[in-house]
Every structure is written in C-alpha cells, then in structure tokens.
Amino acid sequence: MDQRINILNIINSAVTNTVEMLQNADDKMYSIKPAENKWSKKEILGHLCDSAVNNLSRFIRAQFEPEPFVVVPYEQDEWVKRNKYNSMNITEILNYWQVLNSQICHVIANIPEDKLAVECELGNAAFRDNKVTKNLLWLIEDYAVHMEYHLKQITGR
Ligand code: NI
C-alpha cells in the first residue's frame, strides 16, 4: 500500500476512535497531574495539538524552503503551559485537535510526490546533538508514530 495513504489512515482512525472514546470522559479525572511537573491526560492531548500545529508548519515549509529543511525543536513544556490546556474542557481540546488533524491530512494528501523525498535535518537531544537526515515522508510518519505513542498514555491501550 502507498505509505502516505497508510499514514493518513492511521491518523484518521486514531482521531475518530479517540474522539469517540473521550467525548464523554470525566473532565476532572483527565485534569489530574500525576506530579507538579508531569502532564495530565488533558495536557498530553494538548501536547498532541501543539505537535499538530508545529508539524503542520514543518510539512508546509519543507516543501519550499531551502533543502535540507532544518527541523527546529519546539519548547514542549512551555507550549503546554502557555496554552493552559488544563483549564479547558476536554471536548474543546478534542475539537481543536480534530480540526488541526483534518487540515494536516489535507496538506499531507496534497504534497507532490517528489516533495516527499525532501531532505530534513534533525538535530535535537533525542539524537544526542548529532545531525540526522531523514526525508519529509519520514517526518510525516514520525508525526503519526508520536501521536499513537501519546494516545496510549491517555486511553491506556
Ligand atoms: Ni511527545
């Protein structure tokens, strides 16, 4: 199967299943922070919104900026903190996340085939400050993998 279609299917079904599962969730329970410096489940979902915002920007810029496209990490804790997710209703966060992913899928579906091969340079702590070069398709797949990883933390499956 076309790898891009596979990724789009993964994102779409993850969003559908999560919205269905969480739309009637107990808001209080999802607001509990396991520790001062640990995210609540609502904040983890918020982190997925931040990931969507930042990656949407990357998926667009990688198509026209000079190659290799340099992937600059974003301050994840600051984004969660400044977005004040814990004071939002879980359905508000879910709606926001759903809309962001609908646009992300629209953008991914329309990337010209040759642009999926654009080189992207990663250089963050996860790679021990070494520069690693992947292509845009890898970056898109990594977005879905990261989403699934955090969804397991929220839904416990
Ligand atoms: Ni994460």
Image: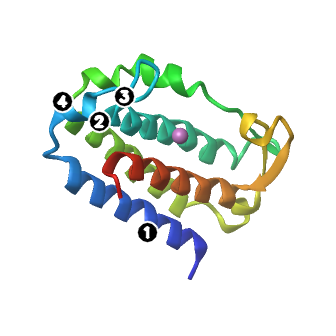
The residue under the point 48% across, 42% down is 52
Q: Is residue 122 left or right of residue 47?
A: right
Indicate which disc, 3 or 1, sits on the residue closer to the N terminus. 1
Residue 9's disc is 1
Crowding at dot 3, Cα within 10 Å, few <14 / some 14-19 / many 20+, comes out as: few
Indicate which disc, 2 or 1, sits on the residue closer to the N terminus. 1
Camera-side residue: 99 or 75?
75
Residue indicated by mark 3: 34
Q: Is residue 57 left or right of residue 32?
A: right
Q: Amino acid at mark 3?
A: Pro
In this rendering, is residue 49 above or below 9? above
- 3 vs 2, front mark: 3
Which quadrant is the C terminus positioned in?
Answer: bottom left
**Residue 62 location (% of width, % of height):** 70, 46
Dot 1: what SS? Answer: helix
CA distance separating discs 4 and 1? 31 Å
Residue indicated by mark 4: 28
**Residue 152 location (% of width, % of height):** 40, 53
Residue indicated by mark 2: 93
Dot 2: what SS? Answer: helix
Camera-side residue: 17 or 149?
149
